[in-house]
Amino acid sequence: MRTLLSGGTVISMDPAVGDLGRGDVLITDGVITEVAARIDAPDAEVIDATDRIVLPGFVDTHRHTWQTAFRGIGADWTFAEYRTAMHGTLKPHYSPEDIYLGNLLGRLEALNSGVTTMLDWFHANQSPEHADAAWQGLKDAPARSVFALCAGAGPDRPVDEAELGRFAADGLVTLALAWRGPQLTTMDIAAADLRLAGEVGLRTSVHVGSGGARGSRPVSAMREHGLLHENTTFIHANGVEDDELRMLADAGCSVSISPDVEVKMGFGWPETGRMLAAGLRPTFSIDDCPSAGGDMFATLRTAFAVQRGLDGSLNSRDLLEFATVDGARACGLFARTGSLTPGKDADIVLLRADDLSVFPFNNPAGTIVAAGHPGLVDTVVVAGRVVKRDGALVGVDLPTLRSRILESRNRIAAAAGIPLDGSWRPRTESE
Ligand SMILES: [Zn+2]
């Protein structure tokens, strides 16, 4: 089966392909087979890309998707308040069904805004049924997802291989270990968990430099214990010193920056510029939707504005690379996605260039970063399948999902006795 995206402005994010002011993209059985100014494919289904910007789908390298039903209630929270609210107060009331709905809605929302690949960092793993529900939520969204399971029965117990063995890559959903690391367990248990991930062939993703680790040289300590591995993505890394960032680069690690959450919750400035200087390629993540928006456009804009404010560095093309090719690398999926490269799966987004918010569309990369928003996302293709067309997700029963989510949210909020209007500022240990 062949599909031709015809007559769009193509930003391939592949230097060998380049950009095309007017270009076609041919998809054959889910795979990009040609990108050129004009392609003759009379048997292909044609999608008219006139007045559309054609670019690879975005990659979100870390999101706690289960929290989606509480979107926005933590816009004013500190990190301590977030932790108390989501993990202390609300999480215990989550049933597997609530987890499923949060993950499904969150994954669809990301997809709707052009995030074709997303890593779900799942840390509401109260039972095997909760983990199964999170997995199923990702499975039921027609998107490419990495289920990063935060396994391990308590901070003093290493991960059991059987717990990971319950899941196996299935279609577009693959598995990773959401690694607790020394921030959430001991150095010895962190080492055992990392060893196990390596044995079973899983990538790992770990938080570092957030939540009180500032000044403690966490990366240096991990290196001393042999815990820096090329298959690990380090999230945030705010306050991590320059020589430690170089240690991450030397070990071939990836990094994930969550600009809105980091600035608002006091982690420090997003480390985009310092990571580049150390030889790392940043990637971006949403982190959590109670306190931040869920789309990549706003994420790019915050990161860009902060780094420009700090030192005037970066340009809009850099930002798009972090959000596509570099994100794909950090998910271990560079061979499959992240650029419009013949041979890769067709994970593609078409943005409306004729929308009044961006018209006339003069400088594609610059305009996407400076003025892009989810309302521009007209068409989304994942592995060759059109999952959003003419601005609407295909085959998704949103009215039913909406009512189920509201029921879930209302039940949890009632059980926890909390308001949803933003007035809830949970009492934290430090107060
Ligand atoms: Zn996180």
Image (cartoon, rainbow, N blue to C red):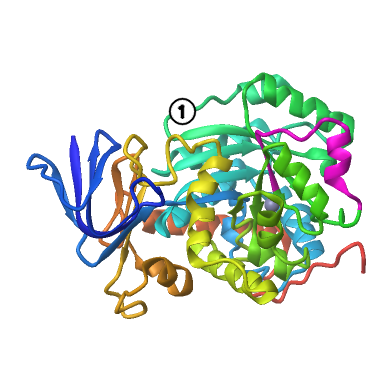
**Is residue 16 shown above or below 50?**
above
Q: Is residue 125 magenta?
A: no
Residue at 51% x, 56% y is: 405
Q: Amino acid at mark 1?
A: Asp
Instruction: Name which residue lies at 36% across and 52% down.
Output: 12
Residue 63 as seen in the image, left or right of residue 38:
right
Residue 385 visible in rendering: yes
Q: Between residues 390 and 61, which one lies in front from this camera angle?
A: 61
Q: Which residue is mark 1?
A: 170
The quadrant where residue 7 appears:
bottom left
Q: Which residue appears at 50% of the width and 54% of the height? A: 321
Q: Looking at the picture, does residue 186 appear above or below residue 37?
A: above
Quadrant of image for the N terminus: top left
Quick check: is 218 in the magenta stretch? yes
Q: Is residue 159 visible?
A: no
Residue 339 locus on image (x, y percent): 40, 46
Residue 224, given in percent of the width and then of the height, sits at 88, 34
Judged left or right of residue 207, residue 45 is left
Secondary element at image label 1: loop
> With 107 as the anchor, is 261 left or right in this view?
right
Front-lying residue, 416 or 353? 353
Vertical comparison of 140 with 81: above or below: above
Q: Which residues are magenta?
A: 216-234
Pointer 1 local density, CA inside 10 Å: few below 14, some 14–19, many at least 20: few
x, y (%) of residue 416? Answer: 72, 59
In the picture, measured across the screen, residue 297 lies left or right of residue 54, that is right
